[in-house]
Amino acid sequence: MPPSLRALWPYLLLTLSQVCFSSNHILGRAASEFMPPIGLSFWRWMGAVIILLPFTWRNILAAWPAIRANWKEVVFISFALVIMGNTMIYIGLNYTTAINASVLAVAQPAVTFILSWMLFRDSITMGQTVGVAVAMIGVLTVLTHGNPLSLAEFDLNVGDLLILIAVTGLALYSILLRRMPKELTPVAQITVLQLIGAILLSPAYLWETVYVAPVPLTWEALFAILWAAIVIAILAMWLWNLGVAEIGANKASVYVYVRLVFVTIGAILILGETLHAYHFVAFALVFAGIWFVSRARTRAKATAPTGEPLQPKI
């Protein structure tokens, strides 16, 4: 592969991951009509584990000493992804509007930058700051339909607080990927995190099944579970982890904006929504912001207490 294409490869992986992740929003909206949120989240992860485990169990078994030695970190990373991240999104969307959830999701890159500095002293360059700001303006253009005054009607409620928890959880997950045992392959890493997450989520799933509603035994529910497990929990996560491993959580975090662009496109093509002039302005701003972040160079590498560079290990 030519060096120029090799340099672009991580950004292509991240873009493709967001195409897959964007389907989660559309699927989640449709499935909310016939599936409870915790049940959808639980079977999303468990379905992925059932598919992946036959291909990854040997690597997981070989890496077990490293997993056991770092079990607290591995469990916390899984908690951040599955409980704080995905499950809170599904629950939160039952109590808040889509526009509120989308506005709050814009904060993820900023939260990632702040937490990566607090935890690992990762540097934040001027180019990254400018890129995030430009992309945020583009996303807000979509969310406000080109009218910034509509933000004055933004109202924080319980659902919004749950989305904020999800944003924090996903930011933590991206940052802490570097602490996963290097003995695990990327696919085995996903399997371990999803299995632990499903175990952590199982008490809440059982409670929801008994006291709220069970997952229905229908073809619609089966399709939703298979799509969430294969396209979102496996393919999207694998592409995302590879991209983060190559360029780091700070640069990768801006690709959250790409997801929102594809959600808009999916809503137009699948849900029949209308494309307006402000969408073109917003998309241009979003991709301009990504260009700034992708071009930014890290001023200095973060170091561990021993003085060694801290690098993402996947």
Image (cartoon, grey):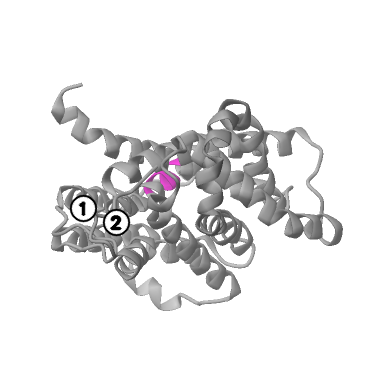
In the image, the segment drawn in magenta is 261-266
Q: Which residue is mark 2?
A: 250
Would you call the spot at circle 2 few (<14 residues within 10 Å), some (14-19), or many (20 or more)? Answer: many
Q: In the rendered structure, which amino acid carries the disc numbered 2?
A: Asn
Task: Please tell me whether mark 1 or mark 2 is closer to you in this view.
Answer: 2
> Which quadrant of the figure has residue 161?
bottom right
Q: CA distance from mark 1 to mark 2?
A: 9 Å
Residue at 22 percent of width and 35 percent of height = 8
Residue 113 versus residue 27 in the image, above or below: below
Tell me whether circle 1 and circle 2 mark residues in contact (CB < 8 Å): yes
Q: Image quadrant for the N terminus?
A: top left
Q: Which residue is mark 1?
A: 293
Q: Nearer the viewer, residue 131 or 299?
A: 299
Secondary structure of the residue carrying numbered label 1: helix
The rendered magenta stretch, by its main secondary structure, is classed as helix
Residue 275 image position (x, y, % from top left): 38, 46
Residue 26, visible in the rendered structure:
no
Secondary structure of the residue carrying numbered label 2: helix
Residue 37 image position (x, y, % from top left): 68, 54
Asked whether, in this view, residue 28 is left or right of residue 109, the answer is right
Q: Nearer the viewer, residue 1 or 155?
A: 1
